[in-house]
Image (cartoon, rainbow, N blue to C red):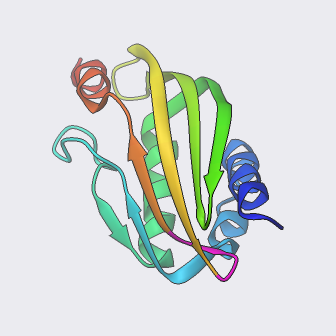
Amino acid sequence: MTNKEVAQALYGYFGEGNVPAILDLLSEDIKWTCPGPTEILPYARVYNGKKEVADFFRLIYENKDFPKFEVREYITEGDKVVALGHWDAKSKKTGNAYSGDWAMAFYFRDGKLYEHKEYYDSYGEAMASRG
């Protein structure tokens, strides 16, 4: 698979809730960064290694629903893929809905994802999650 196809597969597995398949796409030393205030968004932090990334997905599924999650564009250069998209989400804690555009950067080495960074409006999400 190309790096872009790996990123596309990751999103497909995310939509299915197939975390083991996601973890198979990652290097052992994966670094996964999700920004935001951890005291409000329990999944917002830096994760190192597959076990911690599995915890990230557990926390996401426990705290958020995504009525709409779409990738609108992929940009590839060398061993990097950037996905641009939009989500409509809902806090499971408060029931509050929020939406926004996002960017996610994927860094590959030997066909495996070794670093992932998210960029989104964590303030808006935190406000929806606070109630």
Residue range in magenta is 110-114
Question: Horizontally, is 42 left or right of 14 in the view?
Answer: left
**Image quadrant assignment for residue 67:** top right
Can you give x and y, in whole percent of width and height, for residue 125 in the image? 32, 26
Q: In the rendered view, would you say 29 is above or below 20?
A: below
Q: In the rendered view, would you say 100 is above or below 59?
A: above
Can you give x and y, in whole percent of width and height, for residue 95 in the image? 41, 17
Task: Name which residue lies at 21% across and 24% down.
Answer: 130
Q: In which quarter of the image is the C terminus?
A: top left
Task: Name which residue lies at 49% across and 52% down.
Answer: 105
Q: Quadrant of the N terminus?
A: bottom right
SS majority, magenta: strand
Question: Horizontally, is 20 left or right of 117 in the view?
Answer: right
**Could you tell me how many numbered marks the image carries?**
0
Q: In the rendered view, would you say 67 is above or below 7?
A: above
Q: Does the magenta stretch include residue 1?
A: no
Can you give x and y, in whole percent of width and height, for residue 54 in the image? 51, 66
Q: Which of 79 and 93 is in front in this view?
A: 79
**Image quadrant assignment for residue 69:** top right
Task: Name which residue lies at 28% across and 48% down.
Answer: 42
Q: In the rendered view, would you say 98 is above or below 120?
A: above
Can you give x and y, in whole percent of width and height, for residue 38 in the image? 20, 47
Question: Horizontally, is 95 left or right of 65 in the view?
Answer: left
Furthest residue to the right?
A: 1
